[in-house]
Image (spheres, rainbow, N blue to C red):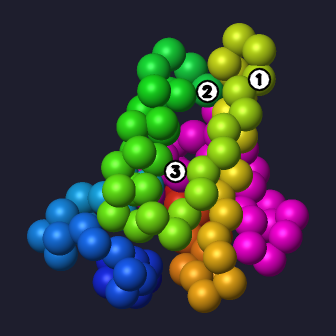
Amino acid sequence: MSDMAWAPQACTLPTAALSLRVAEWDALFSERLTSVSRPQPLRLRLDLAGGPGVEERIRDLVVRETECCSFFTFTFTTASGGDRIRLDISVDQPHEAVLDVLAARSLAGGER
């Protein structure tokens, strides 16, 4: 899947930085993803393995993602001890297709 197909037109991230951002998400998925679910059509749930510095890494990525794609809403739940991080990602109805693509990309990354 190309980087441009993943990023919606509403994203304000400069094109030159897009591939780097997508690579950050892909690395997170391939290194930390333990499960993916879709509890509602407009919400994606990612369970990620924690560890030293992982929560900070994810929070930093989420802050930067929200700056360029403000239609995302990210919610964290961290298990005691930080061994598991749940990241819920929500969008509004017009961006459901973006969430579909993110879900597919996360599944592909988690299988690497």
How many C-alpha atoms fall within 10 Å of the one at disc 3: few (<14), some, or many (≥20)?
Answer: some
What amino acid is found at the position of numbered circle 2 in the picture?
Gly
Above or below, 80 against 79 in this view is above
Decide whether residue 37 is among the magenta residues. yes
List the residue tagged with mark 1. Answer: 79
Above or below, 106 against 101 in this view is above
Q: Position of residue 35 (x, y in %)?
A: 75, 51
**Residues shaded magenta:** 26-49
Q: For residue 2, say whether it is visible.
A: no
The numbered disc on residue 50 is 2
What amino acid is found at the position of numbered circle 1 in the picture?
Ala
The foreground one among 35 and 12 is 12
How many C-alpha atoms fall within 10 Å of the one at disc 1: few (<14), some, or many (≥20)?
Answer: few
Sequence-first disc among 3 and 2: 3
The numbered disc on residue 30 is 3
What amino acid is found at the position of numbered circle 3 in the picture?
Ser
Secondary structure mostly seen in the magenta stretch:
strand
* Mark-to-mark CA distance, 3 and 2: 13 Å
